[in-house]
Image (cartoon, grey):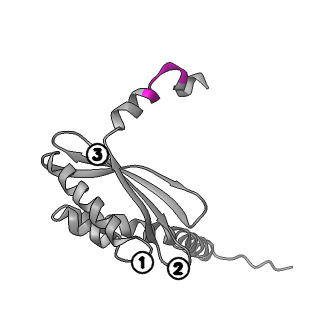
Amino acid sequence: MTTSKTPNWLILLLFLTCTLFHFSASGQSKVEDETLTSLFFKTFKTDPIKAYDDLFSNNKYISSSDLATTKIKLKDYLAEMGDYFGYEEITSKKAGESYILKSFLVKYDRQPVRFTFILYKAKDKWKIQNFSYDANISEELENAAKLDRLKENW
C-alpha cells in the first residue's frame, strides 16, 4: 500500500496564495474609500479650499450654492485656527459595505478640529455623501470619561 504525501512547501504555497487572495479581496473596499480621504488630506495640506472642491467633484447631487456657502464658512473658520500640523484618524464606522463614516482629528495650533466624512458607494465608486467639521471634541471626551460611561462600569 502506497500513500502519497503532498510536500510541505506546496501546502504552504497554497495557504499563502489563499490568504493573499482573501486579504486583497476584502481590503479592496477599504483601499477605495480611504483614497477619497487620503487625496483630500494630501491636497488639504497646501490648499484646503481646493481639497474641499475636489471632495465633492464627483457628486452631482450636491447643490453648488450649498457648496459655495459652506466653503466660505470653512475658509473663515480655518483661518482662525492658526498653523496646520496634520491629521489623525479618530474612527471609522460602517453601515453595511457601502456606507461609511470616517472621522479625523485635524491638528491646528489653536485647537483640534474634527472632520467627519460620510462616504457612499451606490454601485462601483465611492463618493462623498456628507462632510462636516466641529471643535466639540473636548466635550465628548470629557463626557466619555464620566464614571457612568467608563467601560469598567458596563
Outermost residue toward the front?
A: 65
Label located before the other in sequence (1 or 3): 1
Label located before the other in sequence (3 or 2): 3
Q: Main secondary structure of the magenta part?
A: helix
Circle 2 is placed at which residue position? 124
Q: Position of residue 17 (x, y in %)?
A: 56, 75
Is 120 one of the magenta-colored residues?
no
Which residues, given as a range, are shown in magenta?
A: 143-148
Is 146 one of the magenta-colored residues?
yes
| Observer-nearest of 41 and 12 | 41
Q: Amino acid at mark 1?
A: Lys
* Label total for image: 3
Circle 1 is placed at which residue position? 60
Q: Amino acid at mark 2?
A: Asp
SS state under label 1: loop
Which quadrant of the structure image shows residue 112?
top left
| Observer-nearest of 144 and 72 | 72
Q: Residue at x 14, y 51 (%)?
A: 79
Q: Position of residue 91 (x, y in %)?
A: 44, 49
Circle 3 is placed at which residue position? 113
Instruction: Tell me the quarter of the image containing the N terminus.
Output: bottom right
Label located before the other in sequence (1 or 2): 1
Measure how far apart labels 3 and 2 are at the Cα level: 31 Å
Q: Amino acid at mark 3?
A: Val
Q: Residue at x 60, y 77 (%)?
A: 10
